[in-house]
Structure formats: C-alpha cells, structure tokens
Image (cartoon, rainbow, N blue to C red):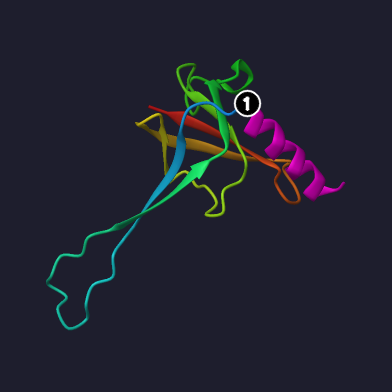
C-alpha cells in the first residue's frame, strides 16, 4: 500500500470537509532551576491546529464505559506532535479529554487519526 498517497488523499478530503476550529493541546511540565528548586515552575502549553471533522461518536464504538454515546469522534490528519490520551482537544473553544486514539490504518504510517473525545 502507498501510505503517502493514502495520507495525501485523506488530507485533501478532510481539508474539504473541515469544520470549525480544532486544536490539539498538551501541557508540558516546566524544568526547575537546580540552583533554586523551591521556586515554582509553570508548565508550558504546546498547541497545534488540526485539519479535522467532528461528529457524534459512531454507535459501533459505544460500549457504555470507555466510550459513551455523548462522546465526539474527531477524524484528523495526524498532527506533527502526535496525539495521546493525556492531551486535550479544543473544539471551537470548548475543551475535551481524549479517551481513545486510533490510527488508520492500524499498521504502517497512519493517514488519519480517530480521536474519541469527551466533554
């Protein structure tokens, strides 16, 4: 399979259907100054805008525990900073927690990420 071609096609389709403003956000702990370890350190925030579409979660993924019917499903071009369940998604200014990250295809270079978001 030509993963680069699949990724380019996915990006083109998601760009054409993109909805609202979707941002992946990650809080990174700050580094304490070894000479002044008692001084509080503020975390930094990394953020990356996503090429994405957002919809209600597909019924096939709802299990009532890990994935709820009220969750959202975000299909996006894989971001440069990757995505993890410890990150936050901001959809049109509203924060949500990522509860599942699924690369598509499951093996090889992902062309799309499916993020299940709560909140």
How many labels sit on residues?
A: 1
Q: Which residue is mark 1?
A: 17
Which residue is nearer to you in this view: 90 or 15?
15
- Which residue sits at x=70%, y=31%? 13
Q: Position of residue 103 (x, y in %)?
A: 65, 42
Residue 3 sits inside the magenta stretch: yes
Q: Main secondary structure of the magenta part?
A: helix
Q: Position of residue 105 (x, y in %)?
A: 74, 41
- Residue 18, quarter of picture: top right
- Which residue sits at x=31%, y=61%? 29
Boundaries of the magenta span: 1-16
Q: Residue furthest left?
A: 38
- Which residue sits at x=64%, y=19%? 60
| Left or right relative to 27: residue 36 | left
Secondary structure at badge 1 equals helix
Which quadrant of the rendered structure holds the C terminus?
top left
Q: Position of residue 104 (x, y in %)?
A: 70, 39
- Which residue sits at x=45%, y=17%? 70
Q: Residue furthest front?
A: 16
- Does residue 57 sit above or below 102 in this rendering? above
């Amino acid at each position: 399979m030509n993963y680069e071609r699949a990724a380019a096609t996915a990006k083109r389709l998601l760009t054409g259907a993109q909805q609202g403003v979707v941002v992946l956000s990650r809080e990174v702990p700050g580094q304490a100054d070894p000479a002044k370890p008692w001084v509080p350190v503020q975390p930094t925030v990394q953020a990356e805008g996503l090429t994405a579409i957002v919809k209600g979660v597909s019924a096939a993924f709802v299990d009532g525990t890990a994935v709820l019917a009220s969750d959202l499903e975000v299909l996006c071009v894989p971001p440069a900073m990757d995505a993890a369940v410890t990150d936050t998604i901001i959809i049109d200014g509203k924060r949500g927690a990522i509860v599942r990250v699924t690369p598509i295809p499951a093996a090889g270079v992902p062309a799309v990420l499916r993020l299940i978001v709560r909140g």
